[in-house]
Amino acid sequence: MALFEFNADDQKPARFAARQPILTRDERVFGYKLLFRTGLTNYFPTVEGDAASRGVIDMSSLIGLTTLSNNLPAFIVTTRDILLGEYLSLLPADKVVAEIPESVSADADVVRACKQLKSAGYRIALSNFRAHDPREALEDIADFLKIDIKMSSLADVVRLTRHYRDRGPRLVAEKVETRDDFEFAKSEGFSLFEGYFFRKPEMMRARGAQSYRTVYLRLLAAISKPSLDWKELEQIIKSDPMLYYRLLRYLNSALFGLRGEVKSINQALTILGEDEIRRWCRLSGMLELSRNKPSDLALASLVRAQFAESIGAKVDSGDTDLFQIGLLSLMDAILEIPMREVLQGLPLEESAKTVLLEDKGPLSPVYDLMLAMEAGIWPRIEALSSQLGIEQDFVAQSYWNAMEWAQSVVTVT
């Protein structure tokens, strides 16, 4: 059954959402800024900010913030009407940060509404905060000051951080796009960082995989062969206690509902079968490889994989495994080695290698749609959906289902 019916009737357009990770200084995911739009023609413009924010609230109420923000704090952009209408009271206070943009004037009514939110346990963030900000009346109750390090001048950033970093509110660096941005923001006293810098090649340290990771690289190579060597697979799984544990825990979870316990590798392989063992090995290997990296990397990899596979049902991708492409697409960031090195030894089709290395070839539109959905680039989503001949509501539904599925996998594997 679908998690969320995007087109329950003809008058409701498809709903799309994305999330922007917010990381701590040690690169752990603190929370997510939610990006939302209803339909593909009016994407989050200021004049329709109320409708967009109401959409987030409506969706959150229906499907739960656990799926939207991985049970972490959700930064939701609000407007004057949202604040005065007390719409945020529909959501759990401990999971919501009301993000107030610069377009909202801090008049007496807004200040009163924000104080009510604070007293109810909600937190307040002021986005795109600047020197001499007109929302000065909200500074004393703000929990987070978000500073755009790209839009502000360097001198303004330095002045702001030196003035506020010891005064109470946590400083959030917005538009952190590179490793250099991250290091600069850390040096200036920011404690939280919003952006995708940790997923990009700039962060690579060009070092080989650590020894414990070689087991999982062997595993990925083994399951990529056209015909599985069951003895080889069993030996690899048995060579790593955590891998062995993951497999037994997975099969004995509620997902399978098996009457008897699974206690051996042979028994596990027999129950799963070839297709499912390939899938499980990919998931488990990726999760273990990413255990010392930002948790969003593992979650995003799973969402990408499931979404790409769903879209693959609507396009001609030949014999290429789109699930595998999605799963491998962040492996360079997880292993901190170049993608070309990641793919060495993996018997992938040429089309898969081309799209992962160069974002070119026949699979490029599917790959680009996967990335556009993740980042919430709505015009790009519209264009790519049209190019692929896929209905927009199917794209939206597939992405939501992928997020829910990824959350369940992280929980049980």
Image: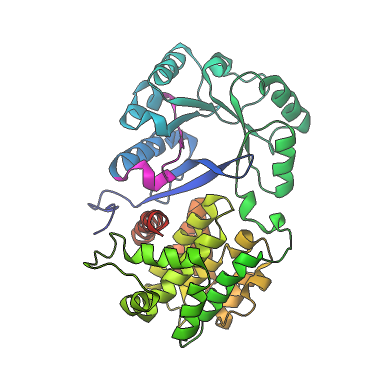
Relative to 154, 385 lies left or right = left
Residue 280 position in % (x across, y down): 42, 69
The residue at 63%/59% (across/down) is 333
Relative to 364, 338 lies left or right = right
Res 316 quadrant in image: bottom left
- One can see residue 361 in this view: no
Q: Nearer the viewer, residue 331 or 144?
A: 331
Relative to 400, 367 lies left or right = right
Q: Give the range drawn in magenta.
A: 63-80
Relative to 2, 93 lies left or right = right
Res 355 quadrant in image: bottom right
Residue 242 within the magenta-colored segment of the rendering: no
The residue at 28%/43% (across/down) is 62
The residue at 66%/47% (across/down) is 177
The residue at 71%/48% (across/down) is 179
Residue 67 within the magenta-colored segment of the rendering: yes
Q: Nearer the viewer, residue 372 or 346?
A: 346
Is residue 364 positioned above or below 134 on the image? below
Q: Nearer the viewer, residue 157 or 315?
A: 157
Res 28 quadrant in image: top right
- One can see residue 410 in this view: yes
